[in-house]
Image (cartoon, grey):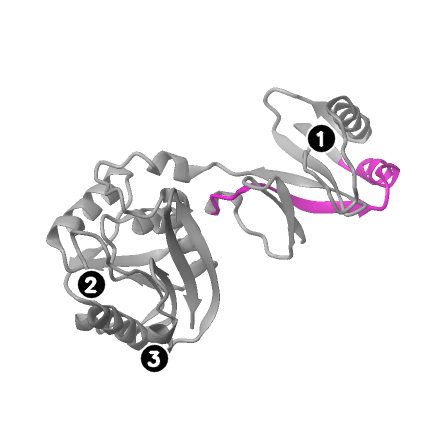
Amino acid sequence: MRSLFGEQAENSILKSTTEIDPSRSPFIKERIEVIYEGDSLPEIVEQVGQIDMKESTFKVIFIKINDLEAGQKIEYDQRRLIEREIGWEIKGEADVRQPDHMFGIVTLGGRWYFGNLRKSEALWLHHMKKPQTFSTALSTRVARAVANIAVPKPDGVKAIDPCCGIGTVLVEALSMGIDIVGRDINPLVTSGSRENIAYFGYEGEVTIGPISDVTEQYDAAIIDLPYNLYTHATPEEQFNILKHARRIAKKAVIITIETIDEMIIEAGFDIQDRCIASKGVFSRQILVCE
């Protein structure tokens, strides 16, 4: 089944053949699991007549986007008319307040798509107010995105955050069902990490010690290289972290405030992708390495 994902930040739609839970991402607002598609609205209207909701109530929602590719802009009144037109053809009782099932309709690139609508629960918003936090910690939204990048499919995957700090990444990863452990050389931050994890009702292992002591193998490592007053790493210590990450993990998502491409390559990783995450005037590089 194909899916269309509504992205919050840019009010755009992404096509995908992968069924991703929209609640995993801090950027995906909703997902349409495509049932019918066509070149025109009448094609969709004709097809939805096959749907029989029996005892379940339903609601049809027009997904508002800026379809620049097709140059279309459908106004509010027209969107409501389209919802009613489609709803009339579906066998069953419509309920605009508390429906048992929601359908989505959207036009993209000159085509129309209709299917089951899955909305994000935005769990990450509840994690923004932690008992323990540092001003230089990753934002909750970036931490969740990084966890998604490192472990897109959690089943059977083991991950580690060997510089976990106060556990921002751990909380997001654990909330998505990722099998992840945390570690840090600073006992103060590991204590804060455990407190944050427990505060949100999750369970996760957080140990004290350097990455060099880790002997287990992992599928992925998430490494926010130390740079703050509590745990600062010299270039030599950074390289040591990267070298041991290469030893224990097949894949690494590395977060750094400076360009360290040569160091990453020397440690044995290939840089597959990268982006910049900004927080005010403060910027981080996020690199996907294998």
Disc 3 target residue: 266
Q: Is residue 270 visible?
A: yes
* Mark 2 residue type: Ala
Q: Is label 2 in contact with label 1 (beta carbons under 8 Å)?
A: no
What's the CA distance linking mark 3 and mark 2? 18 Å
Q: Is residue 41 magenta?
A: yes
* Residue 6 location (% of width, % of height): 61, 42
Q: Which residues are magenta?
A: 25-51
Against 180, residue 143 (above or below) is above
Looking at the image, the residue that sits furthest to the front is 281
* Mark 1 residue type: Lys
**Which is more foreground, mark 2 or mark 1?**
2
* Residue 140 location (% of width, % of height): 36, 43
**Which is more foreground, mark 1 or mark 3?**
3
Report which quarter residue 94 is drawn in.
top right
Q: Is label 3 in contact with label 2 (beta carbons under 8 Å)?
A: no
Disc 2 target residue: 233
